[in-house]
Image: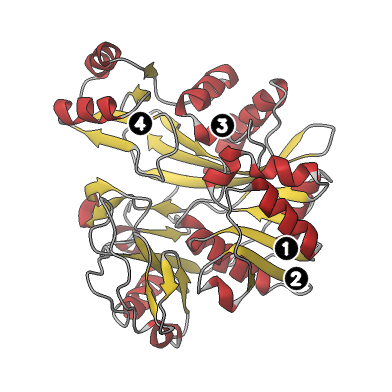
């Protein structure tokens, strides 16, 4: 099978790396990054240009196109490729609005009876003030549109909440959900007789920039799986109360959802509640999940993309994985580009380690340099979380670039038997 992966980041590298290990697959990527170049043939195509992506897929004779990031999905790239008769893993533009608009996703959840936080959609300062007063602190203010994982402010500071609301054209303000957060991915399909979905193993990510969940929100500073502390039956409960009702509601609206539905959950004192939906694989959770996926990835993506019915149930190894993100100086407010990166090869020589590229490039001298906020994701695997964590951090210590920053507490509490 010839597969074209669309995107430039860590999620796409993790997917391409997994696909490249499976017999009978030929992997291409557009535009990719230096890490992806080790496992796929790269093509210099704008991932937001649907016609260019479709032209490339046709010229390659691609059997399957996998659209990684949210922006091309919300822009309708999958629709353009699908209209050319090429199988695409990823939702249509209309269905991708589950991620593209927080207000739309709340509307769908309400119609489907999905458990989530009470909320108000606000477009004026007066509406924002009323909503904040209704819920009280801590305040949760979400930019309605795409914001690369950084459009959410959770704060006890009312002025900071109002300032974030004022900076956005439209916001969703909602009640605060207590309890640890969990990420659950579902590969979704439709075979003409109804909706279907396979869950992947739950994971957990760390959004804040600093240890102890301090500082600003980021796109994710690390992740781990499995969640040894998660309640028994959690996956089945979420599939029954969240995923299936959502897919059925999208079907009822005439916008069936196929691809990857990312369910961000809070395990509250009242049970699981949806924090957010995304319409693609999560980053950095995917980096932890792919090395644990024991079954092939390509067949389940193909079945979702073609509507042939989901028959290839994913299975996972009994090992654990911990991912630690290395970010550039100034992240998440900005990023430093062009800083020379060393030690990646040394890190990858360690048993149980691989390094995923997210924001990297090659300079004019062929040196690996920083090219974004989140630069690398160092993945360690082991027999349990403690071993996986030790492996990941041993590798992190071998990698260097000016201004590098990372959290030191990824999976620390879980490895000790507590909630994150």
Percent of width and height locating residue 97:
56, 31
Picture layout, residue 182 above or below residue 400: above
Mark 2, other Cα within 10 Å: few <14 / some 14–19 / many ≥20: few
Horizontal side of 44 relative to 190 (left or right) equals left
Q: Is residue 324 visible?
A: no
State the residue position of label 2.
25
**Distance (Cα) linking label 3 and label 2:** 31 Å
Labels 2 and 1 touching (C-beta < 8 A): yes
Query: First in sequence: mark 4 or mark 2?
Result: 2
Labels 4 and 3 touching (C-beta < 8 A): no
Percent of width and height locating residue 385:
40, 67
Percent of width and height locating residue 273:
44, 31
**Distance (Cα) linking label 4 and label 3:** 15 Å
Res 2 → quadrant: bottom right
Camera-side residue: 34 or 406? 34
Residue shown at 32% from the left, 61% from the top: 410
State the residue position of label 4.
142
Horizontal side of 324 relative to 185 (left or right) equals left
> Which secondary structure lies at badge 4?
strand
Labels 4 and 2 touching (C-beta < 8 A): no
> Which secondary structure lies at badge 2?
loop
**Distance (Cα) linking label 4 and label 1:** 35 Å
Picture layout, residue 362 above or below residue 284: below
State the residue position of label 1.
3
Picture layout, residue 316 above or below residue 367: above
State the residue position of label 3.
97
Query: First in sequence: mark 3 or mark 2?
Result: 2
Query: First in sequence: mark 3 or mark 1?
Result: 1
Mark 4, other Cα within 10 Å: few <14 / some 14–19 / many ≥20: many
Mark 3, other Cα within 10 Å: few <14 / some 14–19 / many ≥20: many
Residue shown at 33% from the left, 28% from the top: 168
């Amino acid at each position: 099978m010839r597969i074209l992966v669309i995107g430039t980041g860590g999620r796409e590298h993790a997917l391409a790396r997994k696909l490249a290990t499976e017999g009978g697959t030929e992997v291409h990527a557009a535009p990719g990054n230096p890490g992806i170049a080790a496992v796929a043939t790269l093509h210099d195509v704008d991932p937001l240009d649907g016609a260019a992506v479709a032209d490339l897929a046709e010229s390659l004779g691609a059997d399957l196109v996998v659209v990684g990031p949210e922006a091309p999905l919300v822009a309708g790239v999958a629709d353009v490729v699908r209209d050319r008769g090429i199988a695409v893993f990823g939702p249509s533009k209309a269905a991708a609005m589950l991620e593209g608009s927080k207000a739309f996703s709340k509307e769908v959840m309400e119609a489907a009876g999905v458990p989530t936080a009470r909320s108000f959609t606000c477009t004026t300062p007066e509406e924002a003030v009323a909503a904040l007063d209704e819920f009280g602190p801590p305040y949760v203010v979400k930019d309605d549109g795409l914001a690369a994982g950084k459009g959410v402010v959770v704060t006890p500071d009312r002025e900071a909440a109002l300032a974030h609301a004022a900076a956005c054209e439209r916001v969703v303000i909602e009640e605060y959900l207590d309890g640890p957060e969990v990420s659950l991915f579902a590969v979704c399909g439709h075979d003409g007789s109804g909706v279907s979905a396979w869950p992947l193993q739950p994971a957990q990510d760390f959004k804040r920039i600093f240890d102890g969940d301090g500082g600003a929100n980021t796109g994710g500073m690390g992740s781990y799986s499995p969640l040894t502390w998660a309640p028994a039956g959690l996956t089945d409960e979420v599939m029954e109360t969240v995923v299936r009702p959502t897919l059925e509601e999208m079907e009822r609206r005439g916008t069936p959802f196929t691809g990857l539905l990312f369910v961000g959950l809070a395990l509250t004192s009242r049970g699981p509640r949806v924090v957010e939906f995304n319409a693609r694989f999560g980053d950095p959770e995917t980096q932890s999940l792919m090395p644990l996926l024991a079954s092939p990835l390509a067949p389940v993506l193909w079945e979702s993309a073609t509507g042939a019915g989901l028959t290839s149930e994913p299975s996972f190894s009994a090992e654990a994985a911990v991912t630690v993100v290395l970010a550039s100086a100034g992240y998440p407010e900005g990023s430093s580009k062009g800083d020379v990166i060393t030690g990646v090869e040394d890190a990858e020589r360690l048993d149980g380690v691989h390094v995923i590229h997210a924001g990297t490039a090659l300079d004019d001298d062929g040196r690996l340099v920083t090219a974004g906020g989140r630069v690398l994701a160092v993945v360690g695997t082991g027999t349990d979380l403690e071993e996986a964590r030790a492996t990941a951090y041993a590798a992190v210590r071998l990698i260097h670039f000016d201004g590098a920053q990372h959290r030191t507490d990824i999976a620390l509490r879980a490895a000790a038997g507590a909630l994150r």
